[in-house]
Amino acid sequence: MMTPTETVQAQELRLVEILYRATLLNASDIHITAGSRPAVRVDGKITFLGDYPILTPEMTQRLTYSIMSEKHRKQLEEKGQVDFSFGVKDVGRFRANVYFQRGSVAGAFRRLPNKIMKVEELGLPNKILELCHRSMGLVLVTGPTGSGKTTTLATLINYISENFPYHVITIEDPIEYLFHHKKSIVNQREVGEDVSNFADALRAALREDPDVILVGEMRDSETIEIALRAAETGHLVFGTLHTNTAISTITRIIDVFPPNQQEQIRIQLSFVLQGVISQRLVPKIGGGRVLAYELLIPNTAIRNLIRENKLQQVYSIMQSGQSESGMQTMNQSLLSLYRNGLITLEDAYRYSPDIKELERMLALIK
């Protein structure tokens, strides 16, 4: 394989070579856009590849189109953006979003690890692992884009496949991790390729004899409503939302529905919710990133508060009795990482959902 520098010198810039270079740098994301050199995100920060040329609109189109099928090109030209995943031999798998900006083609490529991480590698506690042992209910993994939600879910699904004789169905847009059949059968359906949308795939999944269903993203009221029904009727359902805290996750689910449905949704959610994991990836001292997470595991009191629409009281319950419940707030997670010398104080403040509370917590330990 040619090195990136040799490729540039030959004036035959190829996307495969840029992706290969990004892999050597252990980048999480690669950006291709006109008027800029190719850029990569390493440990959460954007870096430009200085030995590459500044890209023209013609170059960005040629680079991105080189890994797109005719179907994906047509979707891009009709809708202005397209999502898909692909593999490059001897390099790895990538998730792509190709889109138009200022009339030219740009692309963002997320590098996907070649192997699914084990629970102990991610640093997930036993309380999160115990959620995989539930026979039914709803488990949510939330956080902003790039917070590692997909990696956490892949680890949990892989754990289930290794330990339980189940039928697992995943609904993803696009498929990122490839699961192997172990003790479980794992069928993966890609939105846009195998099925038209999440709601249709989830509705069909209920007729496909599943034990576990993974919903890649709970985007709308129809998908959420079907997921709640599936969780009620004896299935263990995993899903994701782009929310920053456990309580905002519950609020988001309820607020998706019109006011006349919200009471019924609160009641359903109070019965089926098994856990909410809200996570962030924080820069680690010395390089890399470390997982900070908030964990909500509903007990009787929290379920009552959800039904009664008193979510503002849930946080105080999450803070108490943690040795028994295993619950944890994001500030407690950040404080622990800081005290253990894994993250800086600056980053603890940067990723805190409530800086004043974190300051009070820090004052108590000084």
Image: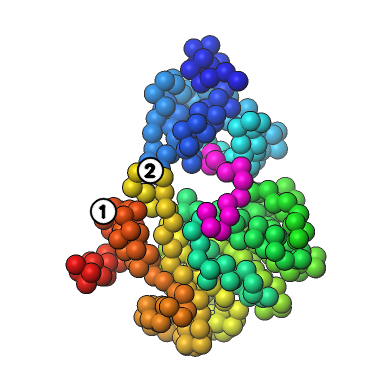
Q: Nearer the viewer, residue 239 or 320?
A: 320
Quadrant for the C terminus in the image: bottom left
- Discs 1/2, front: 2
Q: Is residue 66 above or below residue 202?
A: above
Residue 160: image x %, image y %?
67, 63
- What's the residue at 55%, 62% (across, down)? 240
Q: Report the magenta residues as a range.
A: 109-121
Q: Amino acid at mark 1?
A: Glu
For residue 134, above or below residue 217: below
Residue 315 location (% of width, % of height): 38, 77
Q: Which residue is mark 2?
A: 287
Compared across the picture, whether 179 is left or right of 365 comes to right
Q: Helix, strand or loop at disc 1?
A: helix
Q: Say which residue label 1 marks.
A: 346
Q: Is residue 175 magenta?
A: no
Q: Earlier in the sequence, mark 1 or mark 2?
A: 2
User: Would residue 117 be counted in the magenta stretch?
Assistant: yes
Extreme residue toward the top, this view:
10
